[in-house]
Amino acid sequence: MPFTVPARPYDFVLDPRRTALVVIDMQRDFIEPGGFGDTLGNDVSRLTAIVPTVAGLIALFRANRLPVVHTREAHQPDLSDCPPAKRLRGKPGLRIGDTGAMGRILIAGEPGNQILPELAPVEGEIVIDKPGKGMFWATGLHERLQAIGIEQLAFAGVTTEVCVQTSMREANDRGYECLLIEDATESYFPEFKAAAIEMIVAQGAIVGWSTPLATLERAFAEAMVDG
Ligand code: TIU
């Protein structure tokens, strides 16, 4: 049965029969020194703080037997899916495809491209390698979610204003109702995280809703008691 989750800008009515969790890009490349995030000049240590919260969120969905989707920002070793406009952008220490401390930067299969071990997917969960910031571009994910009747998505992961926000906007345009778990997402820039959340919930949930994990956990627990 659908149940109410207190959220901004107003209550989110969650139907567990048609809801999945999406965990965006919780990869070593963004969270550990020597990866893509680091080579772009960011302080990656900010992002480690949310790992326990993301783990708790994944555990909540697994305990309730709801689908979990994991994404990785990843390019093919021959870079055929990496537009030069992306690879040549800016003045990073190392570019996509160059060899760094955790293998080739942002390349599928390299050590740095793996999801953190404590958040690793388990058998049966969907794992998407995406060449873009958004999770629908060139991935086939929309069709896979439609095939299992998903119409609502909870979002976690990094970074809030880049791959998470892009994926939420793509999902919103495809008709999904999107709920951001605000303490299970992080940015290299705290002010960008705060601004992204405000943009998402503004204008009557123009992109989606936002709530903390504890509120979602309480709503699930109450729904289970009520049957
Ligand atoms: N640089 C940055 O903030 N993010 C990315 O490049 N990708 C994701 O957000 N995953």
Image (tube, rainbow, N blue to C red):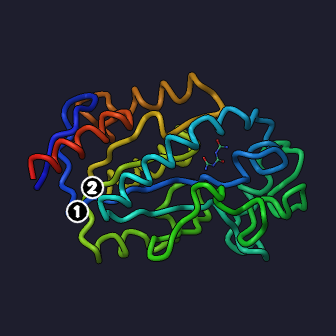
Q: What residue is drawn where x is 80% and y is 59%?
A: 105
From this viewpoint, which residue is outermost toward the front?
225
The relative height of residue 81 versus residue 94 in the rendered view (above or below) is below
Residue 182 is labelled as none
Q: Secondary structure at mark 1?
A: helix
**Along the line of sight, which residue is nearer the eye, 17 or 141?**
17
Q: Amino acid at mark 1?
A: Arg
Question: Residue 18: which disc?
Answer: 1
Quadrant housing residue 38:
top right
Residue 76, given in percent of the width and then of the height, sits at 72, 74
Q: Position of residue 178 (x, y in %)?
A: 32, 47
The picture places residue 36, in percent across and down from the top left corner, at 76, 50
Residue extending farthest to the top is 191
Q: Residue at x 49, y 54 (%)?
A: 23
**Kind of residue sitting beneath label 2:** Gln
Tag 1 near tag 2, CB within 8 Å? yes
Q: Which residue is mark 2?
A: 152
Residue, x 76% and y 46% (percent of image)? 32
User: Up-down: is 183 above or below 177?
Assistant: above
Q: First in sequence: mark 1 or mark 2?
A: 1
Q: Position of residue 179 (x, y in %)?
A: 33, 43
What is the quadrant of residue 16 in the picture?
bottom left
Label 2 SS: strand
Mark 2: few/some/many CA within 10 Å (<14, 14-19, 20+): many
Gap between marks 1 and 2 measured at Cα:
6 Å
